[in-house]
Amino acid sequence: MQPSLAQTTPPHTPIPGTLLGNESHHDPLSAHILGIGTAFPPDLLMPQDLENFATKWCEPSERYALAPLSKTLMVNNHTQIDHRPLVQKITDPLLNQPEPPKIRDVNKVFMDKGVELALTAAKKALSDWGGKLEDITHLGE
């Protein structure tokens, strides 16, 4: 059996005779993905660097005794993930203090750099869609 046009068409492409292809038949309870955008920070963290960073503020005896840290390191060491994107260089002074950074300082980095990445991705999604900002009625994650 041949797949239907709806099964083989990308989700943000109008299909003739459907809601997206016939704007006069609007279903207010339905939502559609009309554009997709992504953004990644430029810096990368290698697996060994993650382990070094994650254990920086732990005593050697604590490194594998702390269950969440132990699980994170196990996943890090037993997957084929080559690198992880970073919003902050691993050499940044914030990440290289004698004590772990305060949550308010980590949050400030997130609010600056994370919001900037989200805005970049949103602009790419708008461009991908090709519509007008004022026509957006729903946002997803």
Image (tube, helix red, strand yellow):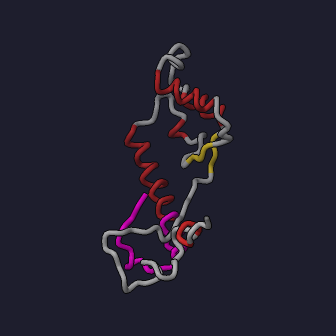
Residue sitting at x 59%, y 45%: 89
Q: Quadrant of residue 29?
A: bottom left
* Whether residue 32 is situated above or below residue 116 in the rendered picture: below
Q: Residue lying furthest top in this view? A: 61
Is residue 124 located in the magenta-colored stretch of the structure? yes
119 magenta-colored:
no
What is the residue that sits farthest to the left in this orientation?
Answer: 28
Q: Residue 103's x, y, as percent?
A: 39, 39
Choose between 37 and 111: the one closer to the eye.
Answer: 37
Nearer to us in this view, 63 or 34: 34
Q: Position of residue 65 (x, y in %)?
A: 49, 16
Q: Residue 79, position in %: x, y?
A: 64, 34
Q: Position of residue 120 (x, y in %)?
A: 52, 64
Residues in magenta?
121-141
**In the rendered view, does 28 fall on the left or right side of 74?**
left
- Toward which corner of the image does residue 45 lie, by quadrant? top right
